[in-house]
Amino acid sequence: MELLSILFEIGVGQGLAGLGAGAAAIGAGIGVGRIGGSALEAMARQPEATSDLRSNMIVAAALVEGVALFGIIICLLVALG
Amino acid sequence: MNRFIRSVGVLIVAIGLAGGLPLAAQDHGDHLDASSEHTAVQGSEESHEHEGHEHEGHEHEGHEHEGHEHEGHEHEGHEHEGHEHEGHEHEGHEHEGHEHEGHEHEEFVAGTFIIHHIADAHDIHLFGDVHIPLPVILFLEGHGLQLFMSSAFDGHGHGDKHLSREGIEYTLHAEDGVLEDGRVVSGQITASEAGAAIGLYDLSITKSVFGMLVILALMVWMFLGIAGSYRKNPGKAPKGIANAMEPLIMFIRDEIAKPSIGDKADRFMPFLLTVFFFIFFCNLLGLVPFLGAFNITGTIGVTVVLATLVFLLTNLNGNKHYWGHIFWPPGVPLPVKIILVPIEVFGILMKPAVLMIRLTANISAGHIIILAFTSLIFIFGDGGQAVGAGSGMGIFSTAFMIFMYFLELLVAFLQAFVFTLLAAIYFGDATHDPAHH
């Protein structure tokens, strides 16, 4: 019961901020997962291209992560500010 | 090789200085126009607050007492209750919620605790009550430059701190500091004379500026030494620190600069090396335990400068081909061009902006996660009421914190690498000449 009352008192805005953080994490998870999966597949097919693939994989993952972090930052601003 | 490394030193100085100023002056610009709204009434209230805070400061040490401090604020004076409530609404709803339930014990506000530890500060907090004071440099309107050490401020703990000096009252606000007029002054210094506020620019050597100066000195020493050793023994295998750094320097040149930029890679090597090592060392400094938890690259003021340099270098080196692709993309039908050109123009600004946010967010997020694990101990411990739960959580948290520290070591390198790589790719885009292929 106490937990419920705390949940209600947190406020809708902060609750939605939490949901937003979750959504950002889901998006980043799908993105980075697909990048990693495809890169591994490509490396398995062509092991001689591993180093090229690895640096491209990191760039792509960083780009996806950047977008996810936009989401996280906005959620933090809502939750803390 | 040593041509690159020598120019590294010059660039570090430039970045260090450029990075330090906006950081120190950040959010302080609005102090200049603040003076007229502040009345004598507020001044007297401020001095009233002074006593209350000082008293509290001695009573409490440690983060878990923050909640109690808030309660203390409310006892101290009924006339500015409204102001206090503003502060609460701003920083922590959890705290308010608990208050309504009438808990007697001290509340721990995780949000304020975390912000306090990732924000820039006027001293370096080592552990417990051990602080290294840093110089405070203020430019006061009508009073000129004021110089004193941050240890001159009265009071310990986390409340507002005060100082009377040459007839001027200084206040170093706590992280949840909000003025009467609703202006947020978290972690900032305000000054007043006989009740009237004085506008000021804060050019202090803060924690982040100090950290950058340390990194700057380290890099100048390290890379001038390395360049010297290559000059002394040309053609011989490198020794000592040059040997340790050569793989990284070669990595930047052969894996980042050459594939992304091509023939013109050498032109950008000094900048890429400087940026890589500056970010890498700043990230690593932030991960040293019990050393003030520097959050240099997690401070937006620093990354803004780094991103601005990338922006300037990209666009100043942009060739006809680069600008052509932005303002008149070839091989695209006209209706699409109308949509594409604004997007491309926006992209010029967006690319460095994303670089900036990625670095800040990654480094800050790492610190926030580690601090969140620390907070969990106090939340589960329930302000000393549930020692068992707190200790159990402590074991769990410590294990995860150690794991996070190792992950952060990887992130420290990865973010420096990604920043350098993306900067190199942007430079490559700007200088790429299709006629040569």
Image (tube, rainbow, N blue to C red):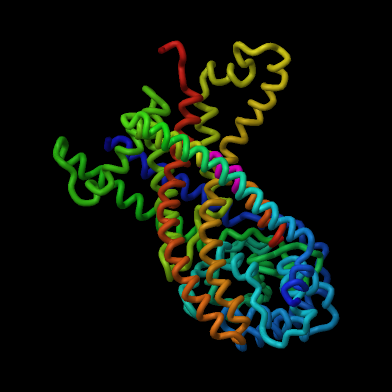
Q: Main secondary structure of the magenta part?
A: helix
Magenta span of residues = A62-69
The residue under the point 46% across, 16% down is: B433
Q: Hey, which quadrant is residue B102 in on the image?
A: bottom right
Q: Hey, which quadrant is residue B324 in on the image?
A: top right
| Residue B426 % position (x, y) | 50, 30
The residue under the point 56% across, 54% down is: B299
Figure disc tally:
0
Identify whether B108 is placed above or below B368.
below
| Residue A23 % position (x, y) | 66, 49
Could you tell whether B82 is left or right of B352 in the image? right
Along the viewing direction, whichever of A33 and B356 lies nearer the viewer = A33
Q: Hey, which quadrant is residue B163 in on the image?
A: bottom right
Asked whether A66 falls inside the magenta stretch, the response is yes
Viewport quadrant of the N terminus of chain A: bottom right
Viewport quadrant of the C terminus of chain A: bottom right
| Residue B120 % position (x, y) | 56, 62
Whether residue B102 is visible here, answered yes or no, is yes
The residue under the point 66% across, 75% down is: B160
Whether residue B179 is visible here, answered yes or no, is no
Asked whether A68 falls inside the magenta stretch, the response is yes
The residue under the point 62% across, 83% down is: B383
| Residue A16 % position (x, y) | 74, 56
